[in-house]
Amino acid sequence: MIVQQLKKISLLISLICLGLGVFAQKVVQPAITDPNWSRPYPPFQIAGNLYYVGTYDLACYLITTSQGNILINTGIADSAPVIKANIEALGFKFKDIKILLTTQAHFDHMGAMAAIKKLTGAKMMVDAGDVGVVTDGGRSDYSLSGDVSTYVPVKVDRILHNDDVIKLGNMRLIMLHHPGHTKGSCSFLFDVKDQKRSYRVLIANLPTIVTDRKFSDIPSYPNIAQDYAYTLNAMKKLSFDIWLASHASQFELQRKHKPGAGYNPDAFIDRKGYDSEINDLQNEFLKKVKGK
Ligand SMILES: [Zn+2]
């Protein structure tokens, strides 16, 4: 009798462990080597209803609408309270976030996503190419070793494809599939208005190369070279007034805006800077394809 009960209990325990194993993946965030990733930065209004709410280098964007707000990117795991404080300092409610987006499913943009989703109940919308990595917290990322998650996995509520439109209130964001950096890296294109004029804004995910391996040595991403070539070509053709990026350093936020400076959307009108970034990335890509 006792033996049978013990057997039952041990079976129950193994079932519980199995059940937990499905959800509780081991999460190990890589060491943060750049202090600017967690360094606070005063939030500010970029243009119209678009605001910067990220850290010194990890760009996070808030787009406000009459029907709630959209948050793009979250920084690393402990950025959640930083972003919340930034949003509240601007006079908005954290709980008004209804839609969560990411420009690429790496831990430096997804680290606090699960926590923010839990706190706000917002819907996570992800480029089809990154759905797998978002769901396993980066474990299946082609550029990583694959034995641990680098951020807490997030449930995907809507899968996005190239040119899909994300609607909230009077806002319409177009998602542009820009794969390579991750399989589902993407950019967002939309219009914002102030009393003076309207601005076409591009939040660009620049296709930097993350892998040290030869492109031909990545069996889990056989189309990587074609994807980078596609993305570079597509990004060259985009039209916009203002451009921003996943990292503040990529679009030289620190040079264009000083903390506490007044409202000045024109500071982010910089086609030349964008073209020069894309040109550098094109050269890096060609070197990679030829060289190694
Ligand atoms: Zn990345």
Image: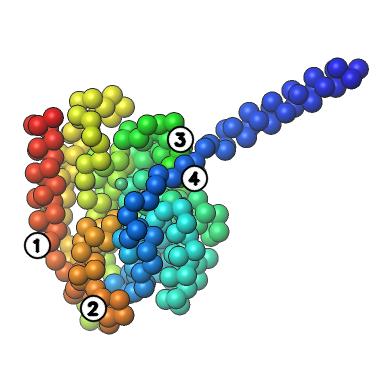
Mark 3 to mark 2 CA distance (whole Å)? 43 Å
Q: How far apart in space, not on screen, are marks 1 and 3 (Cα)? A: 40 Å
At x 9% / y 56%, what residue is drawn? 276
Sequence-first tag of 3 and 2: 3
Q: Which amino acid does the dot numbered 4 rest on?
A: Val
Q: Residues within 10 Å of mark 4 (few under 14, many from 20)?
A: many
Mark 2 or mark 4, which is nearer the start of the sequence? 4
| Image location (x, y in percent) of residue 96 | 50, 66
Mark closest to the chain's N terminus, 2 or 1:
2
Vertical placement of residue 278 versus 57, above or below:
above
| Mark 3 CB near ligand 1 (8 Å cut) | no
* Location of residue 201 in the rendering, given as x and y in whole percent from the top left corner: 24, 64
- According to the picture, the residue beneath numbered tag 1 turns out to be 272
- Give the spatial CA distance, label 4 vs label 1: 38 Å
Name the foreground residue: 284 vs 221. Answer: 284
The answer for how far apart the CA atoms under marks 4 and 2 are is 36 Å
**Does the residue at mark 4 contact the one at mark 2 (Cβ under 8 Å)?**
no
Q: Amino acid at mark 2?
A: Asn
Q: Horizontal and vertical percent for residue 143?
A: 31, 35
Q: Is residue 12 above or below residue 83?
A: above
State the residue position of label 2: 264
**Lower position in the chain sequence, tag 4 or tag 1:** 4
Residue located 9% across and 44% down the image: 283
Which structural element holds mark 2?
A: loop
Residue 171: x and y, percent?
35, 65
